[in-house]
């Protein structure tokens, strides 16, 4: 692909084009970027390229002449690529637009500066305006680099196989799942066990679930157009429910609590999908003694492993756990497990380090409203 950038400041772009993946793409000839200095085409005695705006107002406007002449001198008559002006007024750049641009053989990018460009130049040489977001930059050069960078990584051969673009945010219609690399334990924060286990199907399921969850939390509108399977839709329904629960929980905590007299086994198995259960299963230890299992249901936090039977909970009770909370959305009830057991020194808290820390710092258990408390005094 060949990209021509028309700019007053070619030196702003040059350094970025020499390094990393862009540098390699240009070095290998897969990408060619020509930087065209608009000033060189000015017919003004002092090589001026801007003037005061007609009608008054702050700042300067880039004159039509140098731009129109620079385009005429550098684009062939039969130029068939797209001629784009980077502008906050333009259509917002999306991955879809990037994919369409990557199918072109040639692109011409015009970078504005100051207060913008004389409209007559835009009418003469530009096909469309593209914005890189709803904010105003000092010039179009950063915008042009954004376009070049995003487009070039879709050119076949630019990314190595280890840098595939297939699974990424927006390419799948969803935001990407969280990534982890070595070490598996970074200062006490562990990478999810499922990613270390080598079970490909489980890893795929975990990643899909996290992608759906993140998209629902941060960019729910993407779910309206993303290609989704029936399983995805079920998962989203469950996640939505979990989020409603989180939102409702502060109010619920003020309600009267009922002691738990039964276990929500059915609810649990309906609510937490298999992949998530396996991924989030944690062993709880009291000192070195195994005292039971906990599950993490999405971002809800921890709930006891009722699928292992009542013995799991009984073994907690004998292990210094004072009380536990469990929210049952179908019944709109918050259960409190039996209390009154003094925790011997050094016994475990049934939450992981991150949850515990957030709880200590904020008085609330992070994103997960369900937790298990240790008795205090
Ligand atoms: C200070 S801006 C001019 C803004 C213009 N007066 C307006 O209000 O629309 C100078 C140049 O920066 C570039 N620019 C600023 N914000 C941009 C954005 N969000 N996307 C792409 N280019 C942008 C454009 O090329 C623009 O001509």
Image (tube, helix red, strand yellow):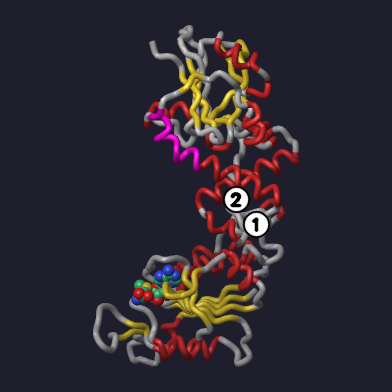
Provide residue 12's location: percent of width, then percent of height: 44, 68
- Do callouts 1 and 2 mark residues in contact (Cβ within 8 Å)? yes
The residue shown at (47%, 22%) is 258
- Whether disc 1's CB lies below 8 Å from ligand 1 is answered no
Q: Which corner quadrant of the image does residue 184 belong to?
A: top right
Q: Residue 176 shows which numbered tag?
A: 2
Magenta region, mostly helix, strand or loop? helix
Residue 181 visible in the current orientation:
yes
Bounds of the magenta segment: 244-255
Residue 11 visible in the current orientation:
no
The residue shown at (54%, 81%) is 83
Provide residue 297's location: percent of width, then percent of height: 58, 34
Q: Is residue 315 left or right of residue 230?
A: left
For the N terminus, the quadrant is: bottom right
Q: Residue 172 shows which numbered tag?
A: 1
Provide residue 140's location: percent of width, then percent of height: 44, 72
Number of numbered markers: 2
Mark 1 → mark 2, Cα distance in angstroms:
8 Å
Quadrant position of ligand 1:
bottom left
335 or 312, nearer to the observer: 335
Assess whether residue 368 is covered by the magenta stretch. Answer: no
Assess whether residue 245 is covered by the magenta stretch. Answer: yes
Provide residue 32's location: percent of width, then percent of height: 61, 73
The residue shown at (53%, 90%) is 73
Local SS, label 1:
loop
């Amino acid at each position: 692909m060949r990209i021509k950038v028309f700019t007053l400041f070619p030196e702003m772009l040059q350094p970025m084009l020499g390094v990393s993946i862009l540098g390699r793409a240009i070095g290998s000839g897969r990408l060619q970027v020509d930087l065209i200095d608009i000033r060189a085409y000015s017919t003004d005695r002092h090589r001026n390229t801007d003037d005061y705006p007609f009608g008054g107002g702050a700042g300067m406007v880039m004159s039509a002449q140098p731009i129109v002449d620079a385009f005429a001198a550098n684009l062939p008559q039969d130029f068939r690529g797209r001629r784009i002006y980077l502008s906050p007024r333009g259509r917002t750049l999306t991955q879809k637009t990037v994919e369409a641009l990557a199918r072109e053989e040639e692109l011409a990018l015009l970078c504005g500066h100051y207060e913008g460009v004389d409209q007559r130049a835009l009418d003469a040489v530009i096909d469309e305006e593209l914005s890189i977001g709803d904010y105003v930059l000092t010039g179009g050069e950063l915008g042009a680099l954004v376009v070049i960078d995003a487009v070039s990584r879709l050119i076949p051969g630019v990314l190595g196989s280890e840098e595939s673009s297939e699974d990424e945010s927006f390419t799948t219609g969803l935001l990407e799942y969280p990534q982890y690399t070595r070490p598996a334990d970074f200062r006490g924060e562990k990478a999810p066990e499922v990613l270390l286990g080598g079970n490909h199907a489980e890893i795929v399921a975990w990643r899909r679930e996290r992608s759906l969850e993140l998209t629902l939390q941060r960019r729910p509108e993407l779910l309206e157009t993303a290609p989704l399977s029936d399983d995805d839709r079920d998962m989203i329904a469950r996640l939505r429910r979990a989020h409603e629960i989180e939102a409702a929980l502060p109010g619920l905590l003020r309600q009267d609590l009922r002691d738990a007299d039964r276990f929500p086994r059915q609810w649990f198995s309906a609510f937490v999908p298999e992949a998530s259960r396996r991924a989030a299963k944690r062993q709880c230890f009291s000192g070195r003694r195994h005292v039971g299992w906990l599950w993490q249901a999405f971002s809800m936090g921890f709930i006891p492993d009722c699928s292992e039977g009542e013995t799991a909970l009984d073994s907690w009770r004998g292990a210094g756990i004072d009380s536990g909370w469990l929210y049952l959305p179908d019944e709109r009830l918050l259960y409190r497990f039996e209390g009154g057991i003094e925790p011997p020194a050094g016994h475990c808290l049934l939450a992981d380090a991150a949850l515990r820390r957030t709880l200590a710092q904020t008085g609330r258990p992070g994103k997960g409203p369900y937790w298990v408390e240790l008795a205090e005094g």
